[in-house]
Image (cartoon, rainbow, N blue to C red):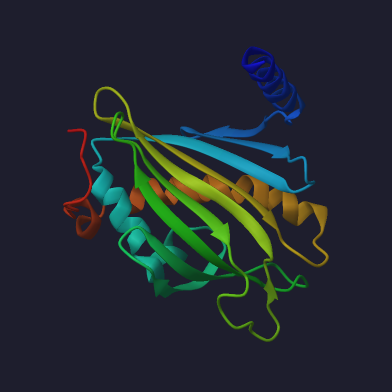
Amino acid sequence: MRLIIYSLTILTSLGLLAKQPKWKQVKNENGITVSNRVRNDGLQEFKAITYVKSVKLSSLMAVMDDVPNYKNWMESIVSSHLVKKINSQERIVYVHFGTPWPVSDRDNVSYSKVSQNKKDKSITIRMRSRPFEYPKKKGIVRVKKGGGYFWFKPLKNKVTMIIYQRFTDPGGSVPKWLLRMAGSKVPYQTLRKLRIMVKKLKYKNKKYSQINEPW
């Protein structure tokens, strides 16, 4: 009986995997690749990948921890601030996104949690929208559903792979050209600027005792 249940579980899992939408590459430039897909729930999702060399995980985390500075490297962000620090791994952040006229600006209240894999030392920052954790602002459309992650995975020769993956329900009426921009330009510029930002002195020399560095 257990064997039958186990076999059915595997077949079901394989079936679900087979139905998952495939990624389509939309940009490959300057050492950054960006792919898009439409999820099973109809929401657009992007995945951007790049690499940095001789950069500590603590430096990357220092950039992520500097919430008010997001506007200087995260594309389309007007402002951001920490709503609540739950503990050293969990927090809630408010972000205001600027959009071209005549589309209304968006904002997002996001819960995130940081974890590090003991074996490969990779760090994952998982994010999920929590729209009711912060008061709404007049004239700005609140993102009701969204999520994703940053993944920092150390490789050989002091190279770290960075993956930024995210899906969002922007709410309201959004033109297709803006959705295409959000799926291509936003992740590309975000990773391009992150590679520059992480090498700035105030982040480069940052150390976190709780992070296990690969080198």
- Residue 165 falls in which quadrant of the image? top right
Q: Position of residue 110 (x, y in %)?
A: 53, 64
Q: Is residue 199 visible?
A: no
Between 11 and 172, the one nearer to me in the picture:
11
Q: Position of residue 62 (x, y in %)?
A: 28, 57
State left or right for residue 103 relative to residue 159.
Answer: right
Q: Which residue appears at 67% of the width and 23% of the height? A: 9
Between 133 and 205, the one nearer to me in the picture:
133
Q: Which corner quadrant holds the N terminus?
A: top right
Q: Which residue appears at 56% of the width and 79% of the height? A: 134
Q: Which residue appears at 59% of the width and 67% of the height? A: 130
Residue at the extreme bottom of the image, as rendered: 138
- Give the mark count: 0
- Residue 178 falls in which quadrant of the image? bottom right
Between 72 and 92, the one nearer to me in the picture:
92
Residue at the extreme front of the image, as rendered: 1
- Residue 86 falls in which quadrant of the image? bottom left
Above-or-below relation of 133 to 72: below
State left or right for residue 74 relative to residue 121.
Answer: right
Q: Position of residue 193 (x, y in %)?
A: 42, 51
Q: Position of residue 204 (x, y in %)?
A: 21, 51
State left or right for residue 130 relative to residue 37.
Answer: left
Above-or-below relation of 97 to 182: below
Q: Which residue appears at 56% of the width and 47% of the height? A: 187
Q: Is residue 137 visible?
A: yes
Q: Which corner quadrant holds the C terminus?
A: top left
